[in-house]
Image (cartoon, rainbow, N blue to C red):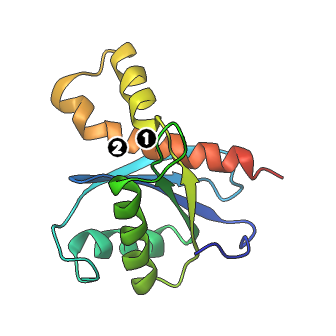
Amino acid sequence: MTAPAPGRGRRLGIDVGAVRVGVALSDPDCMLATPLVTVARDVREPGDRGGSDLREIAALVAEHNVVQIVIGLPRTLAGAEGPAAQAARAFADDLSSVLDVPVEFSDERLTTVVATRQLRERGVKGKRQRAVVDQAAAVAILQGWLDAHSR
């Protein structure tokens, strides 16, 4: 899944959850990640590439001229991969089959925990928090990747 970096251009950061997918977008110079949207996950069998979540993300890639996708890979604190990491890898495989854009993984340990804490500190709670926490986690994933790959 890791391909040579395509250079300048927008990156899409994705936080894959069981119910929702948080999506963030970078600026073309890869300096700043901003929240974009939360997409509802489709329940489908592994390898079923016809989900509306995949179509919605493909539309975002086309609309924003995205050159690369960065998907958060959840690992345990010890660095092991569990069921959530397997689900993220399966989602990436499905996405790669419908898009001609390189997909890369980025360690997302504790991003949702940190995003939830930051939202709570800003007074965002309840339904509103659930609506944006996935986007905030996607921003953390993408911004971490951008910072690590800054030129």
Q: Residue at x 43, y 70 (%)?
A: 92
**Nearer to us in this view, 101 or 96:** 96
**What x and y, as percent, mark residue 60?**
41, 68
Disc 2 residue crowd, few under 14, some 14–19, many 20+, Cα 10 Å: many
x and y percentages locating residue 145 in the rendered image = 64, 50
Disc 1 packing (10 Å; few <14; some 14–19; many ≥20): many
Left or right of residue 130, residue 147 in this image: right
Amino acid type assigned to the residue bearing label 2 in the image:
Asp
Check disc 2 and report its element: helix, strand or loop: helix
Q: CA distance from mark 2 to mark 1?
A: 5 Å
Q: Is residue 84 left or right of residue 127?
A: right
Q: Does residue 127 lie above or below 149 as drawn?
A: above
Q: Which mark is residue 61?
A: none
Identity of the residue furthest to the right in this view: 151
Quadrant where the N terminus sits is: bottom right
Q: Which residue is nearer to you in this view: 138 or 86?
A: 86
74, above or below 101, in the image = above
**Residue contact at pointers 2 and 1, CB within 8 angstroms:** yes
Which element is circle 1 on? Answer: helix
Type of amino acid under label 1 = Ala
- Looking at the picture, how far across and down is residue 94, in whole percent? 37, 78
Residue occupied by mark 2: 134
- Up-down: is 116 above or below 103? above
At a point 33% along the width and 36% down the height, the residue shown is 133
What residue is shown with label 1? Answer: 137
